[in-house]
């Protein structure tokens, strides 16, 4: 991802300092979208190869080609030659039937990954999305396509993850509910295979969830206990800006269906759009309250590389950070609006995170109902921090602005008061 690129570069520098002959390979969304810019930057001193797009085929062929150091036949590969970087033609989208199950025995780090109280692993059931949201770069990886694995293959992957200790599976699909009939078959297959004794989470579109209560009922029966929804925004004009329609009614219905089963709902809501005022942004806050989101994620519009919306925002003169992609994580403000500066926008979102997690949230959210021990432990961990902050405020030792600046520096947003 874009915000991880600087960290990748530091790893590459460390490797090259230890042994300059060790080849370094960059891949993923950011290198795929920015491969030409990276190749023409000083960073290329530490990067030998870039795998563009889906890496399974390209990386395998690269490894096979390293002994002979002939790379011109490897589609989707960029490599160094004669002081520059050669960009081979792109690789066509893979046939998912050719992708083998991951070899979980090959992992070097096998412990320490948890979802709430359970050991967690990831499984993929499909790739791509056809919706074409203007703030998203998925279509630059896969085009506007939707490809699926066979259900039997998905079940085998889940079983393998469970056999390796997973008690919790996160489905990493771009839009798993794009085909609700298939989602229904997947849930039925999980139940039939007896894999409904572990837990599942996924991200989903509000329209996909709202389309079928029967599917949500089956998700609950199969063991789903958490869903992230792209709720996006409270204002129709911003929904239209994103390239979406019908979101308001879909969001209410989707959250209601999930909450009927006490499924934890996290919702992404994007503020910082061109015409947003403070009042407009607070309408997003009220929408999260109205929907009773268990975990609202108040994103700030981020001008991700090569997205349609980035170009539009730059043309409007609203992007205030075009180069430091370490801040492109949805939490930091990289834009301004026609009515708010970058700092004003950032402060509003910071305050929304504080105000949302109040006593009412603590008494009503589904996390405490499903994971009371985890919830209690996490709350006890946070109490000293927030108690100290309240005392500092009371005694006049620090101001709210001080805490805002501390949180911006640390990158950890305050939840539940200062």
Image (cartoon, rainbow, N blue to C red):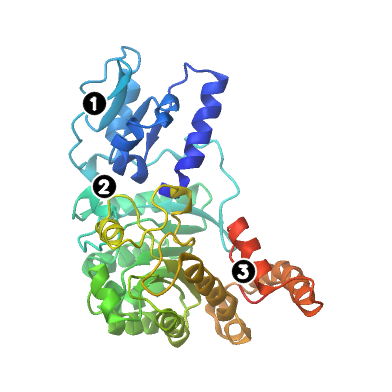
Q: Residue at x 49, y 30 (%)?
A: 12
Q: Is residue 104 above or below residue 181?
A: above
Badge 3: few (under 14), some or many (20 or more) residues near its Cα, within 10 Å? many
Residue reaching furthest top?
A: 68
Residue 179 occupies quadrant = bottom left
Q: Which residue is mark 2?
A: 141
N-term-proximal mark, 2 vs 1 = 1
**In the rendered view of the protein, which quadrant contains the C terminus?**
bottom right
Q: Earlier in the sequence, mark 1 or mark 3?
A: 1
The tag earlier along the polypeptide, 2 or 3, is 2
Circles 2 and 3: CB distance less than 8 Å? no
In front: 393, or 367?
393
Q: Secondary structure at mark 3?
A: loop
Compute the Cα span from label 2 to label 3: 34 Å
Count the labels in the image.
Answer: 3
Q: Nearer the viewer, mark 1 or mark 3?
A: 3
Pick whichever, 65 or 120, lies toward us: 65
Q: Quadrant of residue 114?
A: bottom right
Q: Quadrant of residue 321?
A: bottom left
Classify 2 as above or below 276.
above
Q: Secondary structure at mark 2?
A: helix
């Amino acid at each position: 991802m874009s915000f991880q690129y600087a960290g990748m570069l530091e790893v590459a520098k460390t490797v090259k300092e230890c042994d300059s002959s060790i080849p370094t390979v960059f891949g993923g969304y950011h290198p795929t979208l920015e491969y030409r810019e990276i190749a023409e930057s000083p960073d290329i001193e530490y990067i030998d190869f870039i795998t563009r797009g889906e890496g399974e085929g390209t990386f395998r062929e690269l490894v096979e080609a390293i002994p002979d150091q002939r790379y011109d036949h490897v589609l989707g590969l960029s490599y160094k030659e004669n002081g520059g970087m050669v960009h081979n033609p792109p690789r066509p989208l893979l046939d998912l039937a050719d992708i083998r199950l991951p070899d979980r025995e090959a992992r070097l780090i096998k412990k320490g990954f948890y979802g709430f109280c359970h050991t967690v692993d990831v499984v993929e059931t499909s790739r791509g999305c056809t919706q074409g949201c203007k703030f998203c770069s998925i279509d630059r990886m896969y085009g506007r396509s939707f490809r699926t694995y066979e259900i039997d293959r998905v079940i085998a992957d889940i079983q393998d993850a469970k056999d390796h200790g997973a008690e919790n599976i996160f489905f990493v699909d771009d839009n798993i509910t794009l085909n609700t009939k298939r989602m229904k078959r997947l849930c039925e297959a999980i139940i039939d295979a007896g894999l409904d004794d572990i837990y599942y989470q996924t991200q989903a579109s509000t329209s996909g969830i709202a389309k079928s209560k029967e599917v949500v009922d089956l998700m609950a029966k199969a063991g789903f206990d958490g869903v992230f929804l792209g709720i996006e925004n409270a204002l129709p004009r911003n929904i239209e800006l994103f390239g979406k329609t019908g979101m308001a009614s879909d969001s209410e219905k989707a959250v209601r269906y999930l909450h009927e089963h006490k499924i934890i709902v996290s919702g992404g809501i994007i503020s910082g759009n061109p015409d947003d005022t403070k009042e407009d942004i607070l309408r997003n806050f009220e929408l999260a309250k109205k929907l009773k989101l268990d975990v609202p994620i108040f994103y700030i519009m981020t001008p991700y590389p090569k997205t349609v919306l980035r170009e539009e925002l730059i043309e409007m003169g609203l992007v205030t950070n075009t180069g430091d992609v370490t801040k492109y994580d949805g939490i930091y403000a990289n834009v301004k609006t026609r009515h708010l500066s970058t700092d004003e926008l950032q402060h509003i979102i910071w305050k929304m995170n504080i105000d949302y997690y109040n006593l009412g949230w603590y008494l009503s959210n589904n996390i405490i109902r499903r994971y009371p021990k985890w919830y209690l432990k996490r709350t006890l961990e946070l109490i000293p921090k927030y108690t100290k902050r309240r005392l500092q405020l009371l005694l006049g030792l620090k101001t709210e602005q001080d805490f805002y600046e501390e949180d911006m520096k640390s990158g950890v947003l305050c939840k539940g008061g200062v």
